[in-house]
Structures are given as C-alpha cells and as structure tokens.
Amino acid sequence: MSLETLLGNVVALLEARKCTYALAGGLVSSLYRTQPRTTDDIDFLLDAPDGTAELGVALVRELGLEAHVISRAQLDGGPKFAMKRRSGGDAMVLGRPLEKKTGSVGWGVDFLLSTLPWVPRALERAQHHRVDFGFGAIPCLTLEDLITSKLISCRDERRFKDLDDLASIFDRQDFDVSYVLGRMDELGIIIPVSAKRVVPPELMKRSNAIARRLRAQ
C-alpha cells in the first residue's frame, strides 16, 4: 500500500465517522518547505469531544494498526519520564503496524488530540484551509499553525526534523508574524537556544520576553 493510498483510506474513515480533523505533520510541512521531505507516518489533528483518546484508538484499530496512547505528561516529559508516569490526560494516539501481521501498511498513523492546548484553534482554522491530494480537498494546518506546532515540538532538541522543517519554511515563506507571536504569548512558547540559528529574530525576542515573564511569576 502506498502512502497516498493510506492517506485516502484514513480520510475516508474520518469522513464516514463525521470526525472533525486536519492533516498535519510531514505531508503538510512539505507543502511549505523549499524541498519536500520523506515521512514515516501520517499525522492528523483530531477533535476528541469527550477529552479522551477513545475515538483515536477506535480509528487506529479500524486501520489494522496497534494503538499506543500518549498522555500530556509523557509528551511534556520525554521518553524517560513517559516510562514512569501516565497522567495529565490523553494527548496523542500513535498507530503502528502490528509486528507479525502480514500485509501491514508499513506506515504509522498518529492522531494529535484536541486536548492539547494549541490544537483546537488550529483545527478550527484548518477547516477553511483545504488542499487537494488527488481525492478531494481536505483540511490542512495553515502555515502559521504549522509553525506554532513546530516551535512547540522543537523544545525537545532531539526533534531534528522539526528544526529542519522550520529552517526550510522560514527560508521560503512569508507568514503572519503577528498571529504566531500572539500564539506564543497565549501558549507560553519558549524557543530553545538550539533553534536560534533558524528562527527569525522577532520570534526569538518574544520567546526571551516570555521566559522573563514566567521567571518573574
């Protein structure tokens, strides 16, 4: 099964279930990068009306994948912290091929839930930003919401793909700086020093101001 076929299958499932969703991750990053990049999985934002991972788990299993639920605490604390704690509410559902299943799709399908603070607004804006991937236009993260998500992810300095995405995007694209700065303020986004070489000065300046404000609290 090709990645494009899998994408179509997932979208068909989401539409059949009348889910509110938006495409994210590497496929959307490639829309804005100087050069497209490869990806090992397909990422979606997903509205979780009940605030749990139940819907995401059901979708992953319908796709014939094994579901792994990631909590907010795990996502914030990193892999070592994740092994020790499963609290803070559900944040993501990772769908991975069953190791011994013949005919596995080969790629993963991940759902980032609306319990994450940055997701609800990004999900709403994506409904008005649709891109045709060959089987009809589907909701996709806007450029500014993608940048916001990458700024959050790059707090983990092992997320090299996110830094590379930001470098390529900022090299190619103009974006609504005011919107991103506003989201940084709302979400308390602090950009790591390691990202300074790729992030525009106005975003680093705002990050430093946020860090000072948080230290003073």
Image (cartoon, grey):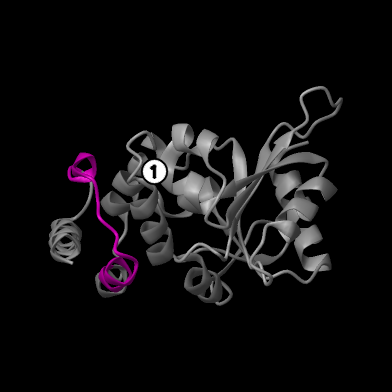
Q: Position of residue 51 (x, y in %)?
A: 63, 67
Say whether residue 30 is left or right of residue 63.
Answer: left
**98 vs 141, nearest the viewer:** 98
Q: Observer-nearest residue: 137 or 92?
A: 92
Residue shown at 32%/58% (left/top)? 173
User: Residue at 39% across / 48% down in the picture?
Assistant: 153
Question: Is residue 182 magenta-colored?
Answer: yes
Q: Would you place residue 88 above or below residue 105 in this image?
A: below
* Circle 1: residue type: Asp
Q: Is residue 108 magenta?
A: no
Please give the residue where the numbered disc 1 appears in the rendered image: 162
Magenta segment, which residues?
181-197
User: Would residue 125 be visible to someone looking at this image?
Assistant: yes
The residue located at (13%, 64%) in the rendering is: 216
Q: Residue 188, located in which quarter of the rendered image?
A: bottom left
Quarter that holds the N terminus? top right
Residue pushed farthest right?
102
**Residue 19 x %, y %:** 73, 69
Residue 9 at what x, y percent from top left?
79, 52
**77 over 91 or under it: above or below:** above
* Residue 192 spot, x, y in % from top left: 23, 45
Q: In the image, what residue occupies the spot 48% across and 49% down? A: 73
The quadrant the C terminus occupies is bottom left
Judge by depth and name the residue closer to the eye, 1 or 55: 55
SS category of the residue bearing label 1 = helix
Left-right relation of 152 to 1: left
